[in-house]
Image (cartoon, coloured by chain):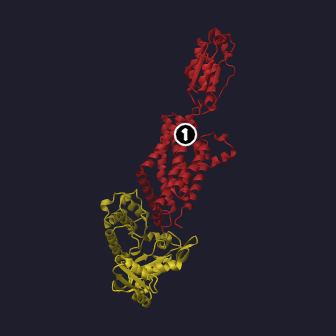
């Protein structure tokens, strides 16, 4: 009667077979390792919502020590890289127009004099604001610089001027990532994105490939059960998922210097749930798709909201309510919170439990649909 | 029940896809240890019928047993005791021969798996190639691998769907020798084919066209039931002769076989009269026993008229 029940040896047969096929398919395996690395480089290095080293031109009518202090302070802030010196207003305007610089800093003739008189000299900053997200952080950094830049110069008899130096005290208080380093947020988030992308695609192909190559007919003629086929196809890719997790964590630590406050063992443990959920989605697509092309299309249909509505690209709380609803269903949304929570905030099991339930529910539903859709006959 | 004389015993088996009836109320009994040949034109429902026997398709109507198990309710049990060889090679091309056999053996939970795999490699002469990927093999070798794979769990019934299509004559001959050895050991074999010489090596035959079972029985029975009379003609201008014969009363089929023409009809008297009308000393006429091919071409023509 064992034909009707789940058996471990049949599951193991599937697992072994999948492993051998994975080993033979070098290109796919290479992609599974290559995609995380490529995405890390793209998102980790290329995309940066807190751009620094912006090209800046300076037009200094006053070359005095105070002006030099100001320029040095701008440079050390990291936001401004001085690439040009403009001598006339027209020249400065042209640099902006051509996009050669993002900022022009104008230091007036009477800068030092007015400063010493306590008259609050005005430094005019001209910015190329066509991309506001590029200039925003730099502008707010400027204000902070202005407040304290002359602290060291204005000593002794000049000390009373310090009080008047700052017009308003802008203070930004950011938790967990006070320097607003984008990578701290993006790199942990990438773990969810990479896993979603590769895990769903690879398993979406799993059953459609068997069907297209004609091996499905043979598989169906054997006593193997749907659950054994599905789990047998999922298990080997869980191992691949863990390789990806490890790659990203290593890069996060050693390339991007992302702080890891929390417990990595906990992170590895809960990753299992997320990896399995994605694989189950893929398997379910695989039972729905008629051919491999359709399977890949379905995978991308799932991947887009996972990247856009999960809080990876845009702040989750900034999205309209309907988008938040869609986002809440997606495993990636919850996994992102878990990863960022563990790595950046040092969350423990208690804090992440509210995010585990939706993942588990998603896994069960996806798996059930997959097993139900898997036909044991060719009818 | 499994002690019954019949490995396959089904009545009224029917399968429809949409409004098309692919298999129409077929009754079939196959004795244990018998080699049963299944013939018929492409699209006649042979593959569909086999898939219903091994639990891959559920019949829309009809009842019966396969190895004593109900074909509708006990598909899981049937799968464990049947070896099914698909028309197209359907093992993993990116796995080696040994890995394929090992995989199948694990799925069937074959006792003493290693020995079973080794034994089947030896039996089919695959030992030296066992590490070759299945995808790199030629048609004849693939066919051997497929046979080895569907025998590995020692099934009681072998269902072979056009196993020798695209296989060279020598490999075909060896394949049939193997089938006969297996049958001698008590295995029941149902095999579909388009080759007449293979049909003649079966213990019993069935002819299927457009989903209907048109003839069945031993070779002699099938030939006799057709009640066909056949003349063979040799000589010059056979093409012109064929044209003048076609359409005459009593002449049902005129088929060229190389340098001879086969002229057949079911009404012997009318056929003889028609032949007498065109007969001349230029050709050599001889009345012969109808061949299986004559019979099947006749059956196919009739089926076209009746069902198509």
Decide: is A140 above or below B48.
Answer: above
Residue A118 screen position, x and y as percent:
68, 12
Q: Determine if residue A23 is in view.
A: yes
Seen from the viewer's position, the closer of residues A284 and B295 is: B295
Q: Which residue is mark 1?
A: A188
Seen from the viewer's position, the closer of residues A112 and A126 is: A126
Seen from the viewer's position, the closer of residues A128 and A5 is: A128
Decide: is B260 above or below A255.
Answer: below
Report whether A148 appears left or right of B163: right
Dividing the picture into quadrants, the one containing residue B126 is bottom left
Q: Determine if residue B28 is in view.
A: no
Mark 1: give few (<14), some (14-19) or many (20+) Cα within 10 Å: many
Decide: is B215 above or below A87.
Answer: below
Residue sitting farthest toward the bottom = B269
Residue B237 screen position, x and y as percent:
36, 78
Which chain contains the residue that carries disc 1?
A
- Colour in which the image shows chain A: red
Decide: is B94 above or below B257.
Answer: above
Seen from the viewer's position, the closer of residues B297 and B252 is: B252
Report whether B171 appears left or right of A30: left
- Colour in which the image shows chain B: yellow
Q: Secondary structure at mark 1?
A: helix
Residue B170 screen position, x and y as percent:
31, 69
Quadrant for the C terminus of chain A, please: bottom right
Dividing the picture into quadrants, the one containing residue A84 is top right
């Amino acid at each position: 009667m064992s034909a009707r029940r789940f058996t471990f040896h049949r599951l193991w047969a599937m697992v072994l077979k999948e492993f051998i096929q994975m080993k033979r398919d070098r290109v796919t395996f290479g992609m599974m390792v290559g995609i995380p690395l490529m995405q890390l480089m793209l998102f980790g290095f290329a995309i940066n919502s807190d751009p620094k080293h912006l090209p800046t031109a300076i037009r200094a009518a006053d070359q005095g020590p105070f002006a030099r202090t100001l320029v040095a302070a701008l440079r050390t802030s990291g936001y401004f890289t001085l690439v040009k010196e403009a001598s006339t207003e027209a020249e400065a305007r042209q640099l902006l127009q051509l996009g050669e610089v993002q900022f022009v800093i104008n230091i007036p003739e009477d800068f030092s004099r007015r400063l010493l008189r306590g008259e609050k000299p005005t430094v005019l900053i001209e910015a190329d604001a066509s991309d506001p997200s590029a200039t925003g952080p730099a502008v707010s950094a400027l204000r902070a610089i202005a407040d304290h830049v002359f602290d060291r110069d204005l000593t002794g008899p000049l000390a009373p001027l310090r009080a008047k130096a700052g017009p308003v005290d802008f203070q930004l208080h950011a938790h967990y990532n006070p320097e607003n380093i984008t990578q701290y947020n993006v790199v942990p988030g990438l773990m969810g994105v990479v896993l979603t992308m590769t895990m769903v695609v690879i398993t979406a192909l799993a059953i459609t490939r068997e069907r297209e190559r004609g091996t499905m007919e043979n598989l169906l003629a054997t006593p193997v059960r749907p659950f054994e086929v599905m789990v047998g196809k999922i298990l080997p890719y869980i191992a691949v998922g863990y390789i990806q997790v490890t790659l990203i964590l290593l890069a996060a630590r050693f390339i991007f210097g992302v702080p890891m406050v929390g417990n990595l063992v906990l992170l590895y443990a809960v990753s299992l749930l997320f990896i399995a959920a994605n694989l189950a989605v893929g398997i379910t697509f695989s039972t729905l798709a008629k051919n491999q092309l359709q399977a890949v299309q379905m995978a991308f249909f799932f991947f887009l909201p996972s990247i856009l509505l999960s809080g990876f690209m845009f702040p989750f709380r900034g999205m309209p309510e309907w988008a938040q609803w869609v986002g809440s269903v997606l495993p990636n949304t919850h996994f992102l919170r878990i990863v960022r929570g563990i790595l950046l905030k040092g969350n423990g099991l208690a804090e992440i439990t509210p995010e585990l339930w939706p993942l588990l529910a998603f896994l069960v539903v996806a798996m059930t649909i997959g097993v139900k859709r898997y036909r044991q006959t060719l009818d | 029940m499994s002690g019954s004389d019949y490995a396959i015993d089904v009545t009224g088996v029917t399968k429809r896809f949409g409004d098309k009836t692919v298999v129409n109320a077929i009754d079939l009994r196959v004795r244990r240890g018998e080699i049963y040949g299944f013939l018929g034109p492409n699209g006649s429902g042979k593959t569909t019928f086999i898939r219903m026997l091994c639990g891959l398709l559920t019949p829309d109507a009809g009842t019966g047993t396969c190895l004593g198990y109900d074909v509708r309710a006990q598909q899981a049990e049937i799968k464990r005791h049947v070896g099914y060889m698909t028309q197209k090679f359907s093992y993993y091309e990116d796995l080696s021969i040994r890995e394929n056999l090992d995989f199948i053996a694990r799925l069937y939970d074959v006792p003493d798996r290693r020995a079973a795999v080794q034994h089947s490699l030896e039996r089919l002469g695959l030992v030296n190639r066992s590490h070759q990927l299945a995808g790199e093999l030629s048609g004849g070798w693939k066919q051997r691998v497929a046979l080895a794979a569907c025998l590995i769990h020692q099934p009681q019934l072998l269902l072979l769907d056009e196993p020798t299509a695209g296989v060279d004559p020598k490999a075909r001959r060896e394949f049939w020798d193997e089938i006969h050895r297996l049958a001698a050991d008590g295995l029941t074999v149902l095999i579909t084919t388009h080759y007449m010489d293979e049909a003649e090596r079966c213990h019993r035959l069935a002819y299927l066209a457009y989903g209907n079972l048109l003839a069945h029985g031993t070779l002699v029975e099938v030939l006799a039931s057709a009640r066909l009379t056949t003349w063979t003609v040799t000589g010059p201008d056979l093409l012109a002769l064929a044209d003048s014969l076609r359409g005459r009363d009593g002449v049902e089929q005129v088929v060229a076989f190389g340098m001879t023409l086969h002229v057949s009809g079911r009404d012997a008297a009318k056929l003889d009269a028609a032949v007498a009308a065109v007969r001349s000393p230029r050709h050599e006429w001889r009345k012969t026993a109808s061949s299986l091919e004559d019979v099947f071409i006749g059956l196919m023509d009739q089926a076209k008229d009746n069902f198509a």
